[in-house]
Amino acid sequence: MSMDFTIDTIAQAACRPKPTDESQLGFGKIYSDHMFTMRWTPETGWVEPRVRLFENLSLSPAALVLHYGQTVFEGLKAYRNPAGSVNLFRAADNAARFARSAQRLDLPPVPDDIFLEACKTLIELDHEWIPRSHGTSLYIRPTMIATEPYIGLKSSSEVLFYVITGPVGAYYPEGFSPVRITVCEGYSRAGPGGLGSAKTAANYAASLRAEKEAIKAGFTQVLWLDASRRRYVEEVGSMNILFKIDGTVVTPPSGDTILAGITKDSVLELLRSWEVAVEERRLTIDDVLSAHQNGQLEEVFGAGTAAVISPVGQLAYNDKTYSIGNGEAGPVALELFDELMGIQYGQRPDPFGWITKVDIA
Ligand code: PLP
Ligand code: COI
């Protein structure tokens, strides 16, 4: 399905100043000048695809999304490459996951080509917002929300799809240095048959209280265990988790309680190509701690679009804190970080065909 987008001309006076110090970008605070919007109803399908000024939305206070959380989103990044164009990383996989998330939340699918075209058009128009220094990128946030005003519980018959972008640096305050993670014991994030495999607000809402408590206790984020038995390791609030145990990289398989991370999938592909043993299997927190006790827990690291590769220096469980690799990033995490970023920034070959190039004026 292809559609002609209406592209608004934005007055120079409406454009905001771009950040000048890329070392201070942080994550998610700055937005580019344009956004993409498109509306859906069952009668019309998707209509009014439009690239316009980034501005506040006008929404009924009764909009279903505000009451019942019918919404999904994605997160992907665009990077400047040495040839002067822009690399989009595995965007088709984000489009596919967006459609799967939408299905779970009973929202209409956005055709993949429109999802991708919206991202590319924003990159072209807002290319001056893409930062230049290594470790920075343009973060792209496609989002779908239920806009129908209705206080009864039902699936919305009015939906808005929009895409916003903004320059980002490191996600965690630690930058790319090791983070401290604590196992969440008092709360659950996603249960069997629930929303865990969808990228939807409710999963993140379920994590906020736990995260605040973790940060207060001096940690960066929470490691979630399975909701039924609180034994099996699942994922961190904003990234998947991997453990290198006695030479093998082990990670829980994505299922209905764990997001199928695109970075994790890329990491597994890279490791297999390097002939490092990998296993996608369930593992308990006790498995992890006994590996630590036996001296076999060589590395722990997270993987995610915002988080990139994030080494875990400390892991806390049951009031005890375990140091991993003396709190330093391990060699596999470092090599993965370099290789992944090398591919993303177009500084290393792309043997898996992960990059889509976008030309900019
Ligand atoms: N798990 C959760 C809960 C996330 O929010 C993310 C980030 O998007 C990930 C895992 C990693 O997914 P991806 O690598 O596709 O960004
Ligand atoms: C991402 O990594 O793209 C995410 O959506 C995680 C979010 C918590 C920032």
Image (cartoon, rainbow, N blue to C red):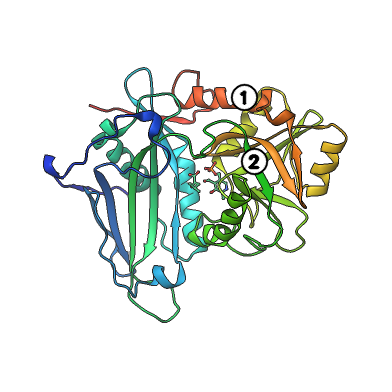
Q: Nearer the viewer, residue 45 or 53?
A: 53
Q: Which mark is residue 334?
A: 1
**Which residue matches tag 2?**
180
Which class describes the residues within 10 Å of circle 1: few (<14), some (14-19), or many (20+)? some
Q: Residue sitting at 62 percent across and 27 percent down?
A: 270
User: Residue at 34% across / 41% down in the picture?
Assistant: 166
Residue 312, above or below 211 = above
* Point 65% across, 53% down: residue: 255
- Relative horizontal placement of residue 272, taking residue 174 as reference (left or right): right
Which mark is in front, 2 or 1?
2
Point out residue 12 in the picture as x, y percentages from the top left corner: 12, 39
Residue 319: horizontal and vertical position, in percent?
76, 51
x, y (%) of residue 335?
62, 22
SS at circle 1: helix
What's the CA distance linking mark 2 and mark 1?
A: 17 Å
Dividing the image into 4 quarters, which one contains the C terminus? top left
Q: Looking at the image, is mark 2 or mark 1 earlier in the sequence?
A: 2
Label number found at residue 356:
none
Secondary structure beneath dot 2 equals: strand
Task: Tell me which amino acid carries mark 2.
Answer: Arg
Point 38% across, 49% down: residue: 142
Q: Is residue 323 above or below residue 58?
A: above
